[in-house]
Image: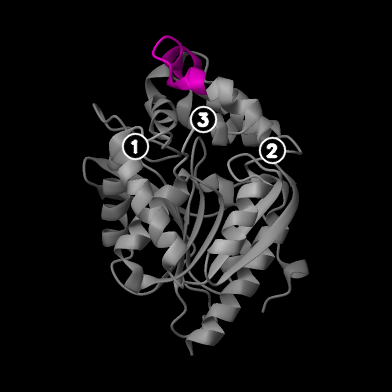
Amino acid sequence: MPDSKTIQVPSTLSFEKHHVPILSGQITYIDTGSPSHSTPNAPIVLFIHGNPTSSYLWRNIIPYISQISRCIAIDLIGMGDSSKVPNLSYTFDDHIHYLGAFIEKVIPEGPIVLVLHDWGSALGFDWARRHEERVLGLSFMEIVVPMQSWASFPDDARDLFQGFRAKETGWDLLVGENLFVEKILPEGVVGGLSEEAMTMYRKPFLEEGSRQPLYQFPQDIPIEGKPAEVWAKAELYHEWLLKNDLPKLFFWGTPGALMQEKKVRFYESNLHNIRTVHVGPGVHYFQEDNPRLIGTEIAGWLWKILGNAK
């Protein structure tokens, strides 16, 4: 396994970005290519971000993994450097279709390890449930799962997210004031974000007309059975997650947001073949607070998977 102390992580996004036409838009993604001394039959590691981030979220983690396997980090449609699609609502179903078409085109065959965060977990779990034969492992943090009531939502964010869902206030808060980028994101990082990082995260959403993806994700959080179509898919992938035997690596932080300690202990006890890693202080965007720990833990876990797959 590469020595984590010798791995250099970039201060800015230094990976080459690729572009591919997908459905009615263009998807942009990082692709590190296969390492020069790649392990035979090593899986591709696919990183999927959530709201309101992009492949930039993984910039300080990928270097630990790219010495073992080819790494691909997608910018979801309408986010990062991927294109905005006229008249697309960016619903969960829209993202499912674009992600599925992307994988079919860019990674049409072979084993995949998924590294997932936030809405990337919902999308990744949904895809993995339907393509389990291709999945070698699941690494995830701050996952989106069905919530039986708003009481399951973090206390300090409940009122704000209910406001995001309210017809009277949601559009103004998320599109007009751009609160997901300007408030939720920086407050979700314990150490705060540099102006350089904030500039990168703001870049895809400088104009109000570009912020439909930021508006739609909060509308689609599966709570109290709504929205029905998202709830149905979330129940399916959640049930699958609880039953499958795939290797799992679950990162959590204190206090956490979507995954606070009570929920973490539930999944720790009820998921099969799981290893949990506490990242220390963390709210939601752990990748910004403790990338070295996340990168080295994924690398060690991946080596273990490769050893067991021989």
Q: Is residue 276 left or right of residue 56?
A: right
Question: Which quadrant is home to the N terminus?
Answer: bottom right
Q: Is residue 245 above or below residue 157?
A: below
- Where does residue 4 sit, x and y in percent of width and height? 73, 69
Query: How would you rate the neighbour count of disc 2 (Cα within 10 Å): few for under 14, some for 14-19, many for 20 or more?
Result: some
| The residue positioned farthest toward the bottom in the image shown | 310
Q: Is residue 154 above or below residue 135?
A: above
Say which residue label 3 marks.
150
Q: Mark 2 or mark 1, which is nearer the start of the sequence?
A: 1
Q: Residue at x 29, y 54 (%)?
A: 100
How far apart are labels 1 and 2 at the CA level?
27 Å
Q: Mark 3 or mark 1, which is nearer the start of the sequence?
A: 1
Say which residue label 2 marks.
189
Q: Residue at x 47, y 39 (%)?
A: 147
- Image-quadrant location for residue 126: bottom left
**Start and end of the magenta stretch?**
162-175
